[in-house]
Image (spheres, rainbow, N blue to C red):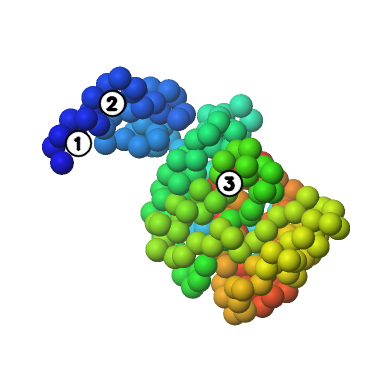
Amino acid sequence: MELKNCFNDFVHLLFPRLCAACNSTLYANEEVLCTNCMFHLPFTDFHLDANNETARQLWGKIEFESAFSMLHLAKSSWVETLLHKLKYKNQPEIGVYLGKLYAKRIGEFISGIDLIVPIPVHKAKLRKRGYNQAAQFAIGLSDGFNIPCNEQLLLRHILSVSQIEKSRTERYDNVKGEFSLHSKVNVKDKHILLVDDVLTTGATICEAGQLLIENGAKISIATIARA
Ligand SMILES: [Zn+2]
């Protein structure tokens, strides 16, 4: 064990781990963000306000229990850099880290969630990127809340009839537009926390959410940020 720690220290000396926001060298006890950046994360605390901006953006578009975003997102801010690295720079650990941090912050306010489900990316994108950024956030939340996460529940299509047909043969059905639902998972009467990285128009979340609702679930919505 001690030898392993020595080895890790040695590796960190050769390849210092850097803060994903400010690029300063991380101390051994720091993960992803340095203490200073972590301290300055612009939390929205939307979970405390049912009429928050994220909820208001979705009102009238879909029925939900609650909706909130973790961080304020300003143009050209370091939160934007962080989200860019999560999505495009092969740093999935940023999503897991933020999910765990958020779960710690809002844990006692969240109750009754049965399952956490990330908005999926197309298979082609997944192959190219290697991971789904929303799923990384969902994994962190799942770990922090101790609520299961199902990354396979929803399947996303590039809209073409042939692909929707193909997905039917792959044990998915209930194809609705861009998404289909894994036919072996029963979501009836489940309260699902639908998770994405950034809320933009809300159209994607609404389409996926509607499919879950039509299959008997009720939903809440959580995103890292809101554009
Ligand atoms: Zn930093």
**Residue 55 locus on image (x, y percent):** 65, 58
Dot 1 or dot 2: first in sequence order is: 1
**Residue 212 locus on image (x, y percent):** 67, 69
Q: Amino acid at mark 2?
A: Val
Q: Nearer the viewer, residue 28 or 167?
A: 167
Residue beneath disc 3:
132
- In this picture, residue 52 sits left or right of residue 149: right
Residue beneath disc 2:
11
Helix, strand or loop under label 1: helix
Q: Does the closest atom of ligand 1 sit within 8 Å of the Cβ of label 1?
A: no
**Residue 62 locus on image (x, y percent):** 73, 65
Residue beneath disc 1:
4
Question: Is residue 121 in sight in this rendering?
Answer: yes
Instruction: Give the quarter of the figure containing the C terminus.
Output: top right
- State the CA–CA distance, disc 1 to disc 3: 31 Å
Dot 3 or dot 2: first in sequence order is: 2
Residue at (29, 26) in percent of width and height: 12
Q: Amino acid at mark 1?
A: Lys
Q: Quadrant of residue 2?
A: top left
- State the CA–CA distance, disc 3 to disc 2: 28 Å
